[in-house]
Image (cartoon, grey):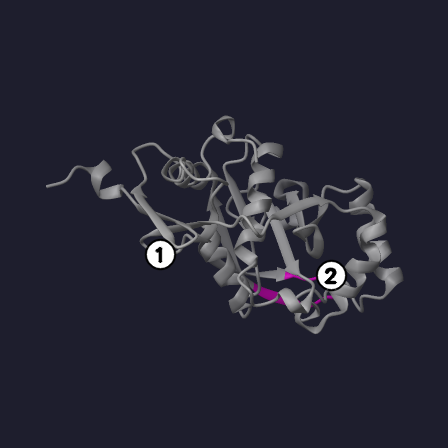
């Protein structure tokens, strides 16, 4: 009979061009570290493809770089346009109609750093295509009461440009955010997202990025309605490892 560590070993595949490099997660090793080790002789750092199956799948994409940069007030017109897109507004509607004035009022303080929430612009090869926001859940006590880990880092995200929707970008956006959050919040042991239960695309993206679906709960919205959401949690140490072990991007 194999021992517990052998039974827990996860196969890992790193796609690099036409090649697939294979290995397993070693005892005590994070998934990200395993991918880096397996791809050590290649150029580039592995990014997530799909972590939801029995085999953990990563890829090296030299022609597609996904980065996050801090949002500025100069980005608010683009954010307004993204929030007005039907595929975004369907899930981001509790602040009311996303007029320019409302977006500035709601998101300007976050950009300025006067609220616990921080805003980030998603760039693909230098082109702005969407946004991410993050926050310490305990900084929002009402929301913290609904979650299992108030010390987790919360994250919300959207691909704003319609031409980039449905192109497999979502998990890589989350991966880019996760790498940055790992540096900014070195003590955090979990990340948390709570998409609407009907948002199948977002739930699938979270699955691929390594999050695990958990409890469904009703979340009060600013417009007075209630949304049924699915709590999704990422085990930071299992997926990314200790913060001190992360290699700089």
- Residue 66 x/y as whole percent: 61, 49
In the picture, which quadrant includes the N terminus? top left
Residue 222 circle label: 2
Q: Residue furthest bottom?
A: 86
Which stretch is magenta?
220-228
Q: Measure the alpha-carbon separation of dots 1 and 2.
A: 36 Å
Q: Identify residue for label 1.
A: 53
Residue 174 circle label: none
Q: Is residue 52 above or below residue 9?
A: below
In reply to whether residue 191 is colored magenta, the answer given is no
- Residue 15 x/y as whole percent: 40, 51
Residue 150: which quarter of the image? top right
- Residue 184 x/y as whole percent: 62, 33
Q: Residues within 10 Å of mark 1 (few under 14, many from 20)?
A: few
SS of the residue at dot 2?
Answer: loop
Tell me which label, 1 or 2, sits earlier in the chain.
Answer: 1
In reply to whether residue 222 is colored magenta, the answer given is yes
Left or right of 226? Residue 247 is left
């Amino acid at each position: 009979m194999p021992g517990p560590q052998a039974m827990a070993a996860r196969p890992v595949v790193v796609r690099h061009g036409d090649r697939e490099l294979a290995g397993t997660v070693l005892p005590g090793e994070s998934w990200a570290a395993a991918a880096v080790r397996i791809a050590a002789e290649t150029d580039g750092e592995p990014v997530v493809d799909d972590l939801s199956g029995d085999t953990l799948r990563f890829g090296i994409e030299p022609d597609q770089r996904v980065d996050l940069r801090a949002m500025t007030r100069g980005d608010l017109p683009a954010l307004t346009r993204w929030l007005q897109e039907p595929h975004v507004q369907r899930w981001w509607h509790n602040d009311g109609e996303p007029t320019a004035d409302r977006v500035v009022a709601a998101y300007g303080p976050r950009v300025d750093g006067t609220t616990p929430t921080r805003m980030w612009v998603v760039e693909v090869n230098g082109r702005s295509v969407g946004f991410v926001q993050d926050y310490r859940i305990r900084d929002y006590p009402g929301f913290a009461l609904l979650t299992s880990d108030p010390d987790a880092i919360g994250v919300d995200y959207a691909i704003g440009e319609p031409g980039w929707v449905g192109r497999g970008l979502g998990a890589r956006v989350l991966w880019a955010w996760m790498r940055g959050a790992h540096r900014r919040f070195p003590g955090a042991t979990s990340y948390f997202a709570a998409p609407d239960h009907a948002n199948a695309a977002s739930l699938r993206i979270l699955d691929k990025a390594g999050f695990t679906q958990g409890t469904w709960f009703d979340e009060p919205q600013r417009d007075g309605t209630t949304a049924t959401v699915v709590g999704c949690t990422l085990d930071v140490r299992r997926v990314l490892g200790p913060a001190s072990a992360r290699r700089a991007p």
